RNA sequence: GGCGGCAUAGCCAAGUGGCUAAGGCAGCGGUCUGCAAAACCGUUAUUCAUCGGUUCGAAUCCGAUUGCCGCCUCCA
């Protein structure tokens, strides 16, 4: 029962062994808050949300750190455009992050540090790097000029992302900057231009380079060596490579022991970009789909593979989720014998207690959420089979107890995946949306009329009413206990 | 130019050396129903891009070919 994770640094799946027994330190690069989050941010945030939940479910004491980058060129640019203070702009989008991710069921991390709260630490780290000969200042002796990390000074540079400096130099698109000693040198401290946010430093007023915050904050909250560092695939280079280089040189630790990177989301087979106009924000996606539909969709493929967001596929998953909730509703409606509503424990003689165990086995293989969903759907079908009327009418107490046990285990898995938290009736109402504004009394009246017609075997009248209700978005189901209705979703 | 990834049914997607290649959506046939709906049962890949190789045995390992995609510049 040990978790295997694909480690980007070694390009292999490895058994996860924590540094300290029973504890996990997890650092994930959060978002730069200059705009609304899109569906790709959602995937990344949900993947690590589930990783943290899963570790907790396995009994680990998790310290999950997820930062906000609240100072950077794009924020300054956007703030200027909107004539706002960068700090104010950043705050707005941090609030938006919580709102959107909250709707998607993302839990807060244990520590959610801001870059601007750690400027002192970044200045300290820059000093250390200069003192140790890993960094240099341009335009020495002036108030201008920037501080760069020297990639030539650290022999391990490039090992994380599997590159070497020669290759990068060869086909490089990096703009050559005469002030740099090597084209790949990256900025640690950037001197402020007029009107830009600034903090005092030994090298004049300025602001930190963007890789530095993660090095400082991970060190502060998790130490110079910690278990897992995560983020989007695109952060592997240069962000994580640079972070790692400066952290190892300054803090003398190993830095992250496992690197976990999630794959990208494309929209209708195209990479999201503002110029293509296919930049799908979480907000826009939530206008079309229920949060759990979105979440389920983002989990329908292994987290490392690219995922294409297409209307057709999301709607297919929605139909599947409806079936799951219908099963829950069916179980809720089941009269069954009253056994005091105690949820049976996990170990049931018929073996159904093994569901959660199997779920964990699958999840242990590099968080195989897609495989885990397959298991859930299998269990749903089995539960429906048990609830289908047999030759006898009533469901036995044994069967009911087994069903309740199954449901408890599916919900337990759902707790890790962040799914199945809705009440079935409410879920269907939310899916039907505001388009359905039919009054319950009106429906009941029509159903009553139809029942009369059916008793009289007036099938034409009965079917006419059924069609009328269908027009109104109501689907009828005639069962042995009479007619029930539900919203068409 | 450098580095990396992917290719499994109509669509989406697990499986990565050996039982009948999960699961979802869609379709078709059936059970149930007055007819439906829902649910269930059956069915839809003798085959995993193509060609070679390794092996008693490969979708799974190796090589080549083709086709997609990502990173190398801010990006989850």
Image (cartoon, coloured by chain):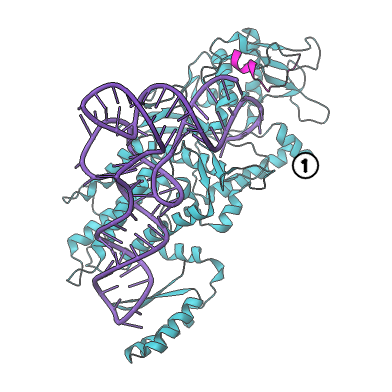
Q: Looking at the picture, tell me which residue is in the foreground, A19 or A220.
A: A19
Q: Colour of chain B?
A: purple
Q: Which chain is cyan?
A: A
Q: Is residue A453 left or right of residue A474?
A: left
Q: Residue drawn 42% across and 33% down?
A: A62
In the rendered image, which quarter contains the N terminus of chain A? top left
| Residue identifier under label 1 | A84
Rendering coords of residue A391 (x, y %)? 17, 71
Q: Looking at the picture, tell me which residue is in the foreground, A184 or B47.
A: B47
Q: Residue drawn 53% across and 32% down?
A: A233
Q: Is residue A282 left or right of residue A387?
A: right
- Classified by dominant secondary structure, the portion drawn in magenta counts as loop
Q: Is residue A62 left or right of residue A238?
A: left
Residue A172 among those drawn in magenta: yes
Q: Residue drawn 47% across and 53% down?
A: A292
Q: Is residue B43 left or right of residue A321?
A: left
The single residue placed furthest to the bottom in the displayed view is A456
Residue A346 among those drawn in magenta: no
Circle 1: is it few (<14), some (14-19), or many (20+) Cα within 10 Å? few
Rendering coords of residue A228 (x, y %)? 46, 27
State which region is magenta: A166-179
On the question of residue A343 being in view, the answer is no
Q: Looking at the picture, tell me which residue is in the foreground, A402 or B31.
A: B31
Image: A279 above or below B42: above
Which of the chains bears the disc numbered 1?
Answer: A
Image: A219 above or below B70: above
């Amino acid at each position: 029962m040990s978790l295997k994770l694909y480690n980007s640094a070694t390009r292999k799946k490895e058994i996860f062994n924590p540094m300290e027994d029973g504890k996990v330190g997890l650092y994930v690069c959060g978002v730069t808050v200059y705009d609304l989050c899109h569906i790709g941010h959602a995937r990344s945030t949900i993947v690590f949300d589930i990783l943290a939940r899963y570790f907790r479910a396995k009994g680990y004491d998790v310290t999950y750190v997820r930062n906000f980058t609240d100072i950077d060129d794009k924020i300054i640019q956007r703030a200027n455009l909107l004539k706002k203070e960068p700090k104010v702009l950043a705050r707005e989008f941090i609030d938006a992050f919580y709102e959107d991710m909250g709707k998607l069921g993302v839990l807060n991390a244990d520590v959610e540090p801001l870059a601007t709260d750690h400027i002192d630490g970044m200045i300290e780290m820059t000093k250390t790097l200069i003192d140790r000969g890993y960094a240099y200042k341009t335009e020495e002796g002036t108030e201008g000029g920037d501080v760069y990390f020297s990639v030539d000074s650290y022999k391990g540079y490039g090992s994380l992302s599997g590159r070497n400096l020669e290759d990068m130099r060869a086909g490089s698109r990096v703009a050559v900057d005469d002030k740099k000693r090597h084209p790949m040198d990256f900025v640690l401290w950037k001197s402020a231009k007029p009107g830009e946010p600034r903090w005092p430093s030994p090298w004049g007023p300025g602001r930190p380079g963007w890789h530095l915050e993660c090095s400082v904050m991970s060190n502060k909250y998790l130490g110079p060596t910690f278990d897992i560092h995560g983020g989007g695939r695109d952060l592997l280079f240069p962000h994580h490579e640079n972070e790692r280089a400066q952290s190892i040189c300054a803090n003398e630790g190993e830095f992250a022991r496992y690197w976990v990177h999630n794959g990208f989301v494309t929209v209708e087979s195209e990479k999201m970009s503002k110029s293509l106009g296919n930049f799908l924000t979480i907000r826009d996606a939530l206008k079309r789909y229920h949060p759990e539909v979105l979440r389920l969709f983002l989990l329908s493929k292994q987290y490392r593979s690219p995922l294409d967001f297409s209307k057709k596929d999301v709607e297919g998953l929605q139909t599947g989720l409806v079936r799951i909730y219908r099963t829950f509703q069916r179980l809720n409606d089941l009269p069954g014998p009253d056994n005091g509503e105690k949820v049976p424990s996990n170990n049931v003689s018929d073996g159904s207690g093994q569901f959660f165990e199997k779920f964990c086995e699958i999840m242990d293989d590099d968080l195989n959420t897609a495989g885990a969903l397959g298991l859930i759907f299998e269990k749903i079908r089995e539960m429906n089979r048990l609830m289908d009327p047999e030759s006898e009418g009533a469901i036995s107490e044994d069967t009911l107890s087994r069903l309740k046990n199954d449901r408890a285990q599916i919900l337990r898995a759902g707790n890790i995946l962040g799914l199945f938290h809705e009440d079935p009736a409410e879920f269907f109402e939310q899916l039907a949306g505001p388009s359905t504004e039919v009054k319950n009394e009106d429906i009941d009246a029509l159903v009553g009329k139809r029942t009369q017609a059916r008793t009289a075997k007036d099938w034409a009248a009965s079917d006419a009413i059924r069609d009328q209700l269908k027009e109104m978005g109501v689907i009828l189901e005639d069962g042995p206990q009479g007619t029930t209705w539900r919203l068409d979703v």
